[in-house]
Image (cartoon, rainbow, N blue to C red):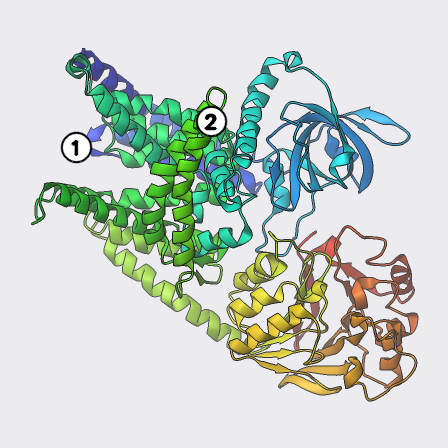
Amino acid sequence: MSGRLKNWSAKITGFLQPSLEQGHCTNLLIPVVLSFIGGIILSRHSIVLPAKFWIIVFIFLSFGLLVNYFQAGKRSLYFLLPLFLLAGSLQTVQTDPPPDQSHIFHFATNQQDVVLTGKLKECTTFDGEKSKLIMNVSSIRWPDRAAETKGLVQLTMNGNPPRDLFPGDLFMARATISQPNTYSTPGTFDYRSFLAARSIWVTGWLRSPSQIIKIKQPPSSWSMEEKLTYRPERLRQQISRFLEDAGLPTGTTALYKALLLGIRTQVPPSLLEDFKTAGCFHLLAISGMHMGLLALLITAVLNYILKKSSWLLLRFPAWKIAALFSIIPLTIYALIAGFQPPVIRSLLMSIALILAIVLDRQHSLNNNIAIAALVILIFDPAILFGASFQLSFGAVIAISAAAPYISGIFTSESTNKPGKLATFHKWLVSSIIISIAALLGTMPLLLLHFNRISLLSPISTLLAAPLLCFWALPLGLTACLLIPFAPTLAKTLIHIGSWGLQVTQWLISFLSDLPFSSLWFSTPSMQEIILYYIMIFGFFLRKKYRLAMPLALIALIILAIIPIIEKIDKNLSDTALVSYLDIGQGSSTLLELPQNYTILIDGGGAGSRHFNVGESIIGPYLWGKNITRLDQLVITHPHSDHTSGLAFIVDKFRPQTIWINFQQSADQELKILTRLARNYGADIKVPPADSILYENGGTKLQCLNNFHPIQQESKTSILSSGADINNHSLVIRLDNNNDSFLFPGDIGTGEEKELISLNKDIDVDVLLSPHHGSATSNSKEFLEKSSPEYMVISAGPFLPDIFPSPLTMEKSGEQKITVLNTAIHGTISFRSNKNKALSMEFTRK
């Protein structure tokens, strides 16, 4: 029987795997996958290769088929690589809206109140403030008409979702719908593309749960497709409710939801930050590590049981059978976790590795990785551009490169330790090597997507992973299966499993408090990422390839030279770049002045406990420009739409000087910010009228006026209400050679008239519209006196009739001013150079 199993194994692996040469895998699938990936990239960027290229491809294919016919060898496959390039380029990466005119997307061209009817598609989520529901809509109704429609809508509302609403339930909802909005500031998370990847093209807002009406419909009316879709999601929601009612601490419940169901939205922000700082945030996302460790545990248990049967031992390799059967609980785990793309990817990677072991091809690790990547990309080519896919395969490939070192530890006999202690020592050392390899393999990708790394990641992962994957996860999965039959026992197992989560919380909190546990860096360029990987893999493969080490050294030298050249180039530059960031309903402007001098004016906008404009928009934008320190920060006035993101900016970018309108401000947010800045040694200053904030050559930044009442020498009656903090703003003017810019904060019409009466020089080329273009500012006299060529309105998309006001737009039209709006044009940048005319560009075309 075992001989037949080996013959069957050899036949299958002969089909799946390339031939072996001198005992080593030829790794032929790697160039295949790289060619396929190249095709996907061409498709993503809509690059159409010329006809001549495909003629050459046809010649190569013909020649390759002839070679393959007369001599079946490994080199014949290389002639087929253009075919895989073509196959990849034919993969459609969905970036355009659905063309079907009956799709809900085409009914949501503007913000409107409607009544939607449809079915709940997925398990509802709650982040502590808001709930999200995904509706598969079937009809839409306005006050005067109705229409049948289709597609998915993401509905959001304050508070918890209705407890009697489960996936598959038919319901009606009165919602304000619109097409998804996203910030177009470079470096910002593309929320619209994220939703589009899930086939969601419309979002909606519910004012309260009372705007949901459930329509009774028995599950027996579902189609087979609906049963396959909704029943697993109903199971997830039942497990979610069970965890909520189990009586665990809030943080522990949230961790269990993340670990079992793949739902991280309820994890408290402080706990989430601890995991990020300690370098083990990946433990909260269901990944190949979770699947692999769970498979290892299940295989060990099944192997122990199977070895009790002498009949099985005589006929089958027990550990191979155990490994094969571990696929079943892994699939159940993926089902409970919702079969989301990252979960499916992890499952496929684990199955590929298990089959490689069963078929005696575990040493062909690179080809196994390539097979998993190819299968995943065939079904979902867009996942190539996601952080989770890149980080997963970056870690696995790095571990594969380190495999010979790990293998050498287990084959080495040079140890003075006794049996079990020696085995433990080998496992410990190999685990550390695996963790370090994973960190090295993902480091540039972590910086590309998150701008931070944790040097504690190998240690925290080594300590926390066993607690989660060998303790809490198996007990939690067992409890999930017992919920319908023995809820009391299931609750007991959940509580026992929670001990591992609570120890993990304590451990992560301790590690995150250590100094330098998390480091922040600027965003690496594509050439820097490529050079880094040449350096790392050159080092790992130095014994196998003679040129590997010289290439690694060359890459290291170039990596060291690049930042030096960039800094010299910036220091010699005489160009000023003024960028008005797309930050929503708020304001933030970056001044990149000649000789590498950087100043940020304001930095605030809408936010929540899970979103901060400093961390999510301003910081990534600065890092993307390779800015790691600010020279100055100007806060025109202490309102959250100008300051809410600045605590993060002060913490990470350490400005040397901060200008505010008044030292003894009663604003708590500003007090916290200035206290933090003083701890870092920053100078906190209040500029009087006509003071120079910065001057160098032809560049000058000046405070024209400080409208805080205590700073006012003039007490004229034309000033706006003193109770409005907006009217206390600093008014800042920038001159760079022949170009000029005005930043008046949120002053009102009274302050505008005061500037004119004081004969302040407000005649500029570019004006940042006061108070986001509102009717309480932007008087006709002010626009006439400033006479800008361009007026920038920093506003969000949700109050288009207030910010900007139609009256402001009418006045600017009369003055023939070109109006640019961050809600429409995205981040707007002006380039000022003494030898060239003022030029402009924006990120949203």
Q: In this picture, is 723 found above or below 845?
A: below
Give the crowd class for mark 1: few <14, some 14-19, many >=20 residues within 10 Å.
few
Q: Nearer the viewer, residue 802 or 759?
A: 802
Among all residues in the image, which is located at the extreme bottom? Answer: 713
Q: What residue is disc 2 on?
A: 488
> Amino acid type of disc 1?
Gly
> Amino acid type of disc 2?
Thr
> 210 left or right of 369?
right
Q: Residue at x 52, y 80 (%)?
A: 681
Q: Nearer the viewer, residue 788 or 513?
A: 513
Quadrant of the rendered structure where residue 737 is? Answer: bottom right
Quarter holding the N terminus is: top left
Q: Residue at x 43, y 32 (%)?
A: 492
Q: What residue is disc 1 on?
A: 23
Q: In this picture, is 256 found above or below 217?
A: below
> 835 left or right of 286?
right
Q: Nearer the viewer, residue 224 or 734?
A: 224
> 445 left or right of 745?
left
Q: Residue at x 47, y 19 (%)?
A: 485
Image coords of residue 805 (percent x, y): 87, 58
Q: Earlier in the sequence, mark 2 or mark 1?
A: 1
